[in-house]
């Protein structure tokens, strides 16, 4: 099987898991909130926000996987830049990531809170999805494409840290856990919009930001 056919098959498998995950999230929220109105207004709002964030995230990561695999394995020119990539590593890392997305979908309508800090299962899985790319960065360490993978991992880890800070501030201040969770969605939504914009326009906005951050210390040393 040539690389293009292999890529199409893997994306079909990813797409199937993503479709099942989206179905799971929709069937867990829409019926009882619209048809039966089983919850109060604030809980319905929380589940609505959870659903929108979940859909945006799963679409973002699915389109990102298509972009990455196309760049690394099917396009003629970029293939040289990914000459030492291992398809099986990228495929299985992506596969387990989308399985994690499916598991996350089962928590959209779950309202239990863990520990004194008040973390919901939904938030726990969100954190897991965000820091998962660290494993990918470790697995691909030393390969030519590691700067791009590391950049994505850094963005997601920084987003995770932002959410964690919101949770800690909310816990210290004694704020309502539901409101704290909703504020956590803000950094995730911002990162998602930026990433989707990059995918839609082909302009790597964050690459320029990281480049400037890397150049500033060098410029300071040169000035000294």
Image (tube, rainbow, N blue to C red):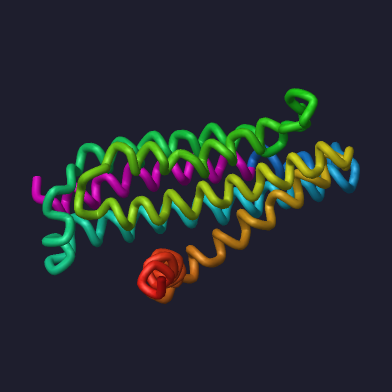
Q: Residue furthest top?
A: 115
Q: Position of residue 212 (x, y in %)?
A: 43, 71
Q: Viewed as shown, does residue 23 lie left or right of 111? A: left
Q: Nearer the viewer, residue 160 or 113?
A: 160
Q: Viewed as shown, does residue 85 lie left or right of 115? A: left
Report the span colored magenta: 1-26
Q: Residue furthest left?
A: 1
Q: Quadrant of the N terminus?
A: top left
Q: Quadrant of residue 171?
A: top right
Q: Is residue 60 above or below residue 180?
A: below
Q: Position of residue 79 (x, y in %)?
A: 14, 60
Main secondary structure type of the part rendered in magenta: helix
Q: Quadrant of the C terminus?
A: bottom left
Q: Residue furthest front?
A: 224
Q: Is residue 75 above or below residue 203?
A: above
Q: Position of residue 82 (x, y in %)?
A: 17, 55
Q: Is residue 23 magenta?
A: yes
């Amino acid at each position: 099987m040539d690389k293009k056919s292999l890529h199409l098959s893997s994306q079909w498998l990813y797409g199937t898991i993503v479709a099942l995950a989206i179905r799971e999230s929709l069937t867990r929220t829409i019926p009882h909130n619209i048809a039966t109105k089983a919850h109060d207004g604030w809980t319905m709002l929380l589940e609505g926000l959870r659903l929108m964030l979940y859909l945006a995230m799963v679409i973002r990561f699915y389109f990102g996987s298509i972009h990455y695999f196309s760049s690394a394995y099917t396009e003629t020119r970029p293939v040289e830049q990914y000459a030492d990539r291992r398809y099986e590593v990228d495929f299985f890392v992506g596969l387990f990531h989308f399985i994690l997305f499916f598991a996350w979908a089962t928590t959209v309508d779950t309202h239990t809170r863990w520990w004194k800090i008040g973390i919901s299962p939904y938030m726990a899985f969100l954190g897991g999805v965000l820091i998962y790319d660290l494993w990918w960065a470790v697995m691909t360490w030393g390969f030519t494409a590691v700067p791009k993978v590391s950049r994505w991992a850094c963005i997601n880890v920084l987003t995770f840290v932002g959410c964690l800070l919101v949770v800690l501030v909310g816990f210290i201040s004694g704020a309502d856990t539901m409101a704290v969770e909703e504020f956590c969605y803000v950094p995730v939504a911002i990162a998602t919009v930026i990433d989707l914009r990059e995918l839609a326009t082909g302009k790597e906005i964050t690459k320029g930001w990281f480049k400037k951050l890397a150049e500033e210390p060098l410029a300071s040393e040169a000035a000294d």
